[in-house]
Image: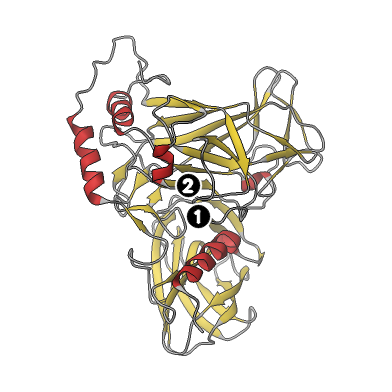
Amino acid sequence: MHPSPRIRILLAAVLTAATGVVVTAGSAEAATVTVQAESYAAQSGAGIESTADVGGGQNVSYLAEGDWMRYDGVDLGGAGALTVSARVASAVGTGRVELRTGSTAGPLLAQFTITASGGWQSWTTLTSTAATHPTGRQTVFAVLRNTTGGDFVNINWFSFGDGAPPASEVGWVPVDQAAWNAQLAEFRALAPRPVPADAVRVPEFNATCAYSHSRPDDPIIFPGLPGASHMHSFLGNRSTDAQTTTGTLLANAGTSCRPAPDLSAYWIPTLYQNDRAIEPKDVVVYYGSRLTDPAPTVPFPQGLRMIAGDARLQAPTPAGSVNAFYCAGPGGEIGRSADGNWPVCAPTATLMFHLVFQDCWDGEHLDSPTHKAHVAYSYDGTCRGEHPVAIPNLSFLIAYPTSGSAAGFRLASGLASSMHGDAFFAWDNRALGERVKNCLVQRAKCNTDGDF
């Protein structure tokens, strides 16, 4: 008996969040499985870093001869030819990636010859076809082979099936083009306000948010499934729960953010100190631009969903780590926790985290199977390729009312490296449009009220 479409969708959502394996089903018989390279169950020699590839996220790096990663439960489907793809980047080339089943020396499923792509973040997709292969769920090993020595390739993801998933399949949420065109027309018709001569010429406006409530819900990863997530601390719209939609956000006027026209939902994993929840004392949600020329920036479409960071990333964060918690204020950091992963702040300083979201959009989808593939980080100061639409560069500046101690902290999602944030946008169209037109397009620093 085949599972119903609803059950298949829920299973795909659970699998994605838990393992990094994305099942994109067109029918019960045919599917494409995308495996994020960093979602390995075990590895030898692999490192993880942020990627400039489309969709952002992480990639596996520093790969050399004999290194390997293991992926459990990869569904290779039924009998018949299997298309296998790998998203890779290399500054040097001269090697290959072997995909083997069962063990590092098991039967060869596919292999990819690595040549120089132009840099460690210059990505290309390689494809191979397996005429025969094991069927159903298998353990797949990615084994690195190189005879010249040294690191030779970065890997973003593998896919197994019939190629890249078409936009009509599960997990891709198309934008309502008529509503988006109307929102764009309203935005383009706005006359910009003159910028005062003494204005700070930085493209920026903000919302100032307080903690609202906590729930083990995630309406992006687990829509309609209350209690399915780790604990989240919610900011902004006070109605946010597992049942949240664009409509429920716009219908609820209660928000913990200023300005009031921002009815968006924002959330982060709850921080714990000695099993006591430490909620943010304040969060500034910045909307800016990292583009060389911010003039093409347009507002977010209503209902756009975005995730920054990776809840699955469980890696040490010693002093000096990027994308880590830090201390701000007089005295700064005065030590580290016993495990080295958390700063200890002076009593006069504040524990902080700065989380930066993607700023380029594909112009077609409000969400995607990975919740990242429809957006990307700008590259070389521009939005181009599969994500040509420049949107405001969202970031959270999070302050916690604690200094920390040798005992450190934990996130509901695990180690400090698993810090992540979600945004589900629901702004009054005119209020958002005026801020984008006045502050970002004109490269002028504005306050919470949208004034210069």
Instruction: Name the residue located 49 percent from the left edge and 71 percent from the top edge.
Output: 8
Image quadrant containing the C terminus = top left
Q: Check the image and name the residue furthest to the top.
A: 198
Image position of 427 with respect to 385: above or below? above
Query: Pointer 1 and pointer 2: residues touching (CB < 8 Å)?
Result: yes
Could you tell whether 331 is left or right of 158 in the image? right
**Residue on which disc 2 sits:** 244
In percent of width and height, residue 44 lies at 67, 65
Residue 62 shows in this picture: no
| Label 1 or label 2, whichever comes before in sequence order | 1
Of 73 and 213, nearer the camera is 213
In percent of width and height, residue 303 lies at 38, 45
Report the number of discs: 2
In percent of width and height, residue 121 lies at 44, 53
CA distance for labels 1 and 2: 8 Å
Q: Residues within 10 Å of mark 2 (few under 14, many from 20)?
A: some
Residue 223's label in the rendered image is 1
Residue 152's label in the rendered image is none
* Quarter assignment of residue 443: top left
In percent of width and height, residue 40 lies at 61, 65
Element under disc 1: loop
Instruction: Name the residue located 50 percent from the left edge and 55 percent from the top edge.
Output: 223
Could you tell whether 83 is left or right of 189 in the image? right
Instruction: Name the residue located 37 percent from the left edge and 68 percent from the top edge.
Output: 165
